C-alpha cells in the first residue's frame, strides 16, 4: 500500500455531482503501478447515468457560482492552490505510483499544476470588458465577459495533475462548472484534486470527477445540451472524433492534441546548452509529452559532436522505479507505448538508420525501455511523420536554414518547436518561419502558467494558460444601449 502522510488523499471513489460513489473490487476498475504492475486501488466504473447526474448538478451549482464575486472565486482557488502545495509530497507519490515518472519530476508536476490554479485565482478579477465608441450619438456599446457555463473536460495520463488544473483553473475562475473524465490509467491524481477542492470550499456539485467508460462518458458529455464547452487533451485521433460528436450541439471546443515537434540545432549553437535542452525537450517524462521533441535536426558541422555529447549525457542518467533516489527515467505507461517505440526503431533501422545509443527494452523488464538515439535518420522513416511518444531521439542531418525550415514545417501538426542558435537575425527569421503555436529558442522547456499553450494545424484549438486562457471559458456579450 502506498504510504502517505494523509491517506485520505488516495480515495477509491468518484465525485458525481454532490455525492461520492465508492469503488468495489468486484465492479471497479483496477489501477496499477506501471513500474511494478502492483495494484494501487480501484475506481468506480461509471457511465451514462452518472454523467447525466454530474452535468445536472453542475448546471445548478454553476448558476450560483457565477453570481459570486470574482474575488470570492479567486480566494477559493487560492486555498485550493495552497492545499495542493501543502500536500505536494503526497500528491507526487500518488502520481508516481500510477504514472511512473520519477518522484522529483512528479512533485515538479504538482507545483507546475498548482501554478495554474494560483495564476487563475489572480486572473479571475481581470476579466475586463470594453466600452466602445458608438456608431450613433444616442447609443453606447458595452462588452461584457460572462462564463460559458457547464464545461466537460477529458484529460490524458501523461500529466495526471497539470492537464486538469490547466483547464479547471480558468474554468472555475471564469465562473464555470466542470465535469471531468480523467484517464483510466491515472484517476487517483484527479480524485485527490477533488478531495482538496472540497476542502478549499469549492461548492458542492461544481466539480465532478467521473471514472469509467471513456466512450460512454464522452458520448454523454458531447451530446448534452447543458454542456456548453468541451476541453480535451489527448490524441488527434480521439480529438477529431470528439470534435465531430460536438457538432450537433455546436459546442465550443478547446483541443490540445498531438505534436510532432522539431528540435533544430544550428552550427552556431552553444552545443552543451543544446544537449541539455534536448534532454529536457526529448526525454522529459520519458518522451511522453505532446511538446516532446520528436525530430531532432542537427546541422552537418556539429552533427557528430552533438550525437556524441547527447549519448554521453544519456549514459549518465539512471533508469528505474520512480520511487528510487536519483532515477531520471521511469517505465513507459504501458506495453502499447513500448511497442510504438520498438516499431519506430525497427522501421528506421530497416531503412538505414543506426542505433547510436540504447535501442532495447531495459533489463529491468516490464515497460522499461532504454533511452535511444538513432543517427542517419531520413524523412522516409516513420519517425519523421509520426509522434513516437517515447524515449527515442532520431537525429536528422541538414545543411541549410531554408532546408531545415521546410523539413520542420512538413507535418500536419503544429504544437511545439525548438531551435538553438546564437545568431540574433536567425532567431527572428526562424522564430517567425516555424508554423507552430510555440517556439522554444535556446531552451527546451517552454510550458508555464504565464504563457499561452496551444497549437496550430492538427495540434488543436484554443490556448491554455496566460492572460488569454480565461477567454476560452468566457463568452463575449455586447449590450447596445439606445435612447441616450
Ligand atoms: P492518450 O494517447 O493520451 O491515451 P487518448 O486520446 O487515447 O490519448 O486518450 C486521452 C483521453 O481521452 C483519456 O482520458 C481517454 O480515456 C479519453 N478517451 C479515449 N477514447 C475516448 C472516447 N471514445 N470518447 C471520449 N474520451 C475518450
Image (spheres, rainbow, N blue to C red):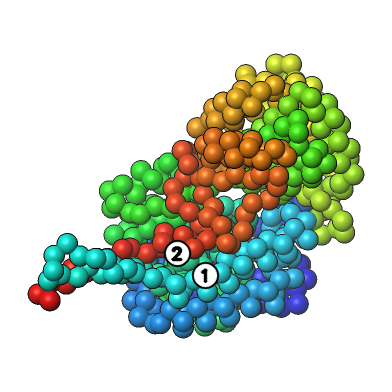
Residue, far top: 351
| Sooner in the amino-acid sequence: mark 2 or mark 1 | 1
The local secondary structure at tag 2 comes to helix
Residue 278, image quadrant? top right
Looking at the image, which is closer to me, 213 or 298?
A: 298
Residue 151, image quadrant? bottom left
* Residue 298 in view (yes/no): yes
**Residue 198, percent from left and from top:** 54, 79
Mark 2–mark 1 CB contact (< 8 Å): yes
**How dense is the environment of label 1, judged by Cα within 10 Å: few (below 14), some, or many (20 and up)?**
many
- Along the horizontal axis of the image, is 216 left or right of 449? left
Looking at the image, which is closer to me, 443 or 267?
A: 267
**Residue 170, percent from left and from top:** 48, 66
Residue 447, image quadrant? bottom right
Residue, far left: 483
Alpha-carbon span between mark 2 and mark 1:
8 Å
Q: Is residue 384 shown above or below 442?
A: above
The dot on residue 120 is 1
Q: Residue at x 13, y 69 (%)?
A: 137
Q: What residue is pinned by disc 2?
A: 470
Image quadrant where one finds the N terminus: bottom right
Q: Residue at x 52, y 45 (%)?
A: 437
- Along the horizontal axis of the image, is 289 left or right of 219? right
Q: Is residue 322 shown above or below 421?
A: below
Q: Is residue 440 shown above or below 208?
A: above
- Along the horizontal axis of the image, is 165 left or right of 221? right
Q: Residue at x 31, y 63 (%)?
A: 476
The dot on residue 169 is none
**Residue 81, percent from left and from top:** 60, 74
**Residue 423, percent from left and from top:** 70, 37
Amino acid at each position: 500500500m502506498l504510504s502517505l502522510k494523509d491517506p485520505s488523499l488516495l480515495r477509491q471513489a468518484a465525485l458525481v455531482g454532490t455525492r461520492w460513489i465508492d469503488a468495489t473490487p468486484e465492479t471497479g476498475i483496477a489501477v496499477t503501478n506501471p513500474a511494478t504492475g502492483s495494484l494501487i486501488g480501484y475506481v468506480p466504473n461509471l457511465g451514462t447515468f452518472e454523467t447525466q447526474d454530474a452535468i445536472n448538478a453542475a448546471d445548478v451549482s454553476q448558476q450560483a457560482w457565477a453570481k459570486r464575486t470574482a474575488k470570492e472565486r479567486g480566494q477559493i482557488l487560492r486555498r485550493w492552490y495552497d492545499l495542493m502545495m501543502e500536500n505536494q509530497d503526497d500528491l507526487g507519490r500518488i502520481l508516481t505510483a500510477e504514472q511512473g515518472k520519477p518522484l522529483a519530476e512528479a512533485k515538479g508536476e504538482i507545483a507546475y499544476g498548482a501554478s495554474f490554479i494560483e495564476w487563475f485565482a489572480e486572473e479571475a478579477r481581470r476579466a475586463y470588458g470594453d466600452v466602445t465608441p458608438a456608431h450613433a450619438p444616442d447609443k453606447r456599446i458595452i462588452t461584457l465577459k460572462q462564463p460559458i457555463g457547464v464545461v466537460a473536460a477529458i484529460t490524458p495520463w501523461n500529466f495526471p495533475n497539470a492537464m486538469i488544473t490547466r483547464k479547471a483553473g480558468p474554468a472555475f475562475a471564469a465562473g464555470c462548472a466542470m465535469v471531468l473524465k480523467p484517464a483510466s490509467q491515472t484517476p487517483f491524481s484527479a480524485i485527490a484534486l477533488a478531495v482538496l477542492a472540497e476542502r478549499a470550499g469549492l461548492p458542492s456539485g461544481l466539480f465532478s470527477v467521473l471514472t469509467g467508460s471513456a466512450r460512454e462518458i464522452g458520448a454523454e458529455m458531447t451530446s448534452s445540451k447543458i454542456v456548453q464547452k468541451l476541453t480535451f487533451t489527448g490524441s488527434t485521433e480521439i480529438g477529431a472524433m470528439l470534435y465531430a460528436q460536438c457538432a450537433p450541439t455546436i459546442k465550443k471546443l478547446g483541443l490540445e492534441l498531438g505534436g510532432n515537434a522539431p528540435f533544430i540545432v544550428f552550427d552556431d549553437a552553444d552545443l552543451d546548452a543544446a544537449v541539455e535542452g534536448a534532454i529536457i525537450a526529448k526525454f522529459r517524462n520519458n518522451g511522453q509529452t505532446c511538446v516532446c521533441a520528436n525530430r531532432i535536426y542537427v546541422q552537418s558541422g556539429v552533427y557528430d559532436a552533438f550525437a556524441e555529447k547527447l549519448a554521453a549525457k544519456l549514459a549518465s542518467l539512471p533508469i528505474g522505479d520512480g520511487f528510487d533516489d536519483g532515477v531520471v527515467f521511469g517505465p513507459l505507461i504501458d506495453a502499447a507505448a513500448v511497442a510504438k517505440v520498438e516499431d519506430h526503431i525497427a522501421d528506421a533501422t530497416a531503412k538505414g538508420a543506426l542505433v547510436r545509443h540504447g535501442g532495447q527494452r531495459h533489463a529491468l523488464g516490464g515497460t522499461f525501455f532504454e533511452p535511444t538515439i538513432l543517427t542517419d535518420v531520413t524523412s522516409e522513416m516513420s519517425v519523421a511523420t509520426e509522434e513516437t511518444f517515447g524515449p527515442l531521439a532520431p537525429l536528422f542531418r541538414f545543411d541549410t536554414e531554408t532546408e531545415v525550415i521546410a523539413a520542420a514545417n512538413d507535418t500536419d501538426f503544429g504544437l511545439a518547436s525548438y531551435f538553438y542558435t546564437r545568431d540574433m537575425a536567425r532567431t527572428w527569421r526562424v522564430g517567425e518561419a516555424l508554423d507552430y503555436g510555440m517556439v522554444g529558442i535556446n531552451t527546451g522547456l517552454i510550458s508555464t502558467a504565464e504563457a499561452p499553450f496551444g497549437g496550430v494545424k492538427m495540434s488543436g484549438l484554443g490556448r491554455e494558460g496566460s492572460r488569454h486562457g480565461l477567454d476560452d471559458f468566457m463568452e463575449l456579450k455586447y449590450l447596445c444601449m439606445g435612447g441616450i
